[in-house]
Amino acid sequence: MRTLFLSMLLLLCVEVNAAAPAFSRLYAVADSAETVYHTPAGMTRLDANAFTLSGILIKYMGEFDIDESVTTISGGAPDSGDPILVPSLYYVHVVNDDWRAGISLNIPTGFGSSSGGSWAGRYYSTESSLILISTSPGVAYRVNEWLSLGGGLNINYTTSDITTAIANSDPDFSDGKLEVESDGLSVAVVLSSLIELSPTTRIGLNYHTESEADSEPDVKISGLGASSEAIERLEVAISDLEIASKIPAHFQFGIYHRLDNDWELTFDSIWMNFSEFGVTEISIVDNEIQAPDDLYEDFWALSAGLSFPLSAGMTGRVGALYAQSAIKDENRSFSFALDRIYGLGAGIQYEWQSGDIVDVNLNIFDTGNAPIDTGDDPVRGRIAGEYVDHYALGLELSYHWN
């Protein structure tokens, strides 16, 4: 349960992959090929072609602890998650003195759960996932010595899966199964600017429009003690739902400042219109669809970073992160058990004599106890509990060719 790809674990669909502790140094640093994704306008600060290959390995340590005093369905707790590796790559090309072009390929969004088909909450969720694979071409133009403008596209392939057990009212039937799969392409427009207030201070601003995959869900209902006409009606109705295939609009802001001793300070923030996310949990109860909508809320995420020289060619870094919960406790679901997040990280950057750079960062995240109480349901029962040992470890390695 609660097996989450790294960026969604932290910022839930705000699309971050960063070679810095606790996702700091995002939008105003603009010192590597990653800026084609984070702040396209920042590409003008690169004087030569640049390429970055990055990988993030994360392991969630927590488990869901069921409150047996109120839970009415047998089956125990959900399965735990396995470590996940998320790769990404970025490239920036110098066109001329004023123009840059670049492209990235990554997995900025991916999260979900796989709980097993016999656990206590199986009638609410047994498996769910949302995975986004994105390629992002971008261009940048230096208007003058203090202003650069950029833009690009996020071309997204989204795939989602929702699987839920169905409680049959007829005791002669075992559990049925609902499977909903959908995939599709969507495109978001990115508008970007980098404002260089001085050689040591700059601001990055980005806006991403909403994008929604145009897809027709594939719905399969099996093992349900109902007529073929009733099953067909349910499948058609579920196909018409707005299942979570939307990347909501979001705004990003970052500021960078270098001190006289070459220490660097950064602050980054993100606001996401997450109330537009869509349906993430679907159940069938007494041959009727239960698909709660309007569960999620707009939220902010903030990060701060500090970088300081350790020796010739070596730099130390620390960072901290906070993200608001995107859902109220009373609306939280087993599919995406989101809560507020705190993060701390530390890392080292080393520059080789060739000019290539390697980043290594280790992060720890407190993802919250995310309490869930479904309330009484005459068919699906009541399941309540919270996550214990709710921490995740993330190890990130990036190599920058310059």
Image: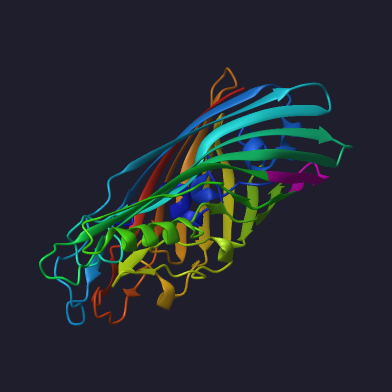
Query: Residue 177 appears at what percent x and percent y?
Result: 25, 57
Q: Nearer the viewer, residue 332 or 170?
A: 170
Instruction: State whether residue 43 appears in this view.
Output: yes
Q: Nearer the viewer, residue 4 or 116?
A: 116
Q: Nearer the viewer, residue 195 or 247?
A: 247
Query: Residue 267 appears at what percent x and percent y?
Result: 64, 55
- Residue at 74% in and 40% down: 151
The secondary structure that dominates the magenta segment is strand
Whether 45 is drawn above or below 67: the answer is above
- In screen coordinates, is 44 left or right of 66? right
Outermost residue on the top side: it is 354
Q: Quadrant of the C terminus?
A: top right
Q: Quadrant of residue 369?
A: bottom left
Outermost residue on the left side: it is 172
Q: Quadrant of residue 116?
A: bottom left
Query: Residue 362 appears at what percent x and percent y?
Result: 41, 45
- Residue at 55% in and 32% down: 105
Q: Is residue 83 magenta?
A: no
Q: Quadrant of residue 387?
A: bottom left
Q: How is the image coloured?
A: rainbow
Q: How many marks?
A: 0
Q: Quadrant of the N terminus?
A: bottom left
Whether 274 is drawn above or below 209: the answer is below
Q: Which residue range is magenta in the image?
A: 189-203
Whether 185 is drawn above or below 217: the answer is above
Instruction: State whether residue 260 appears in this view.
Output: no
Q: Is residue 196 magenta?
A: yes
Query: Residue 363 appears at what percent x and percent y?
Result: 42, 49
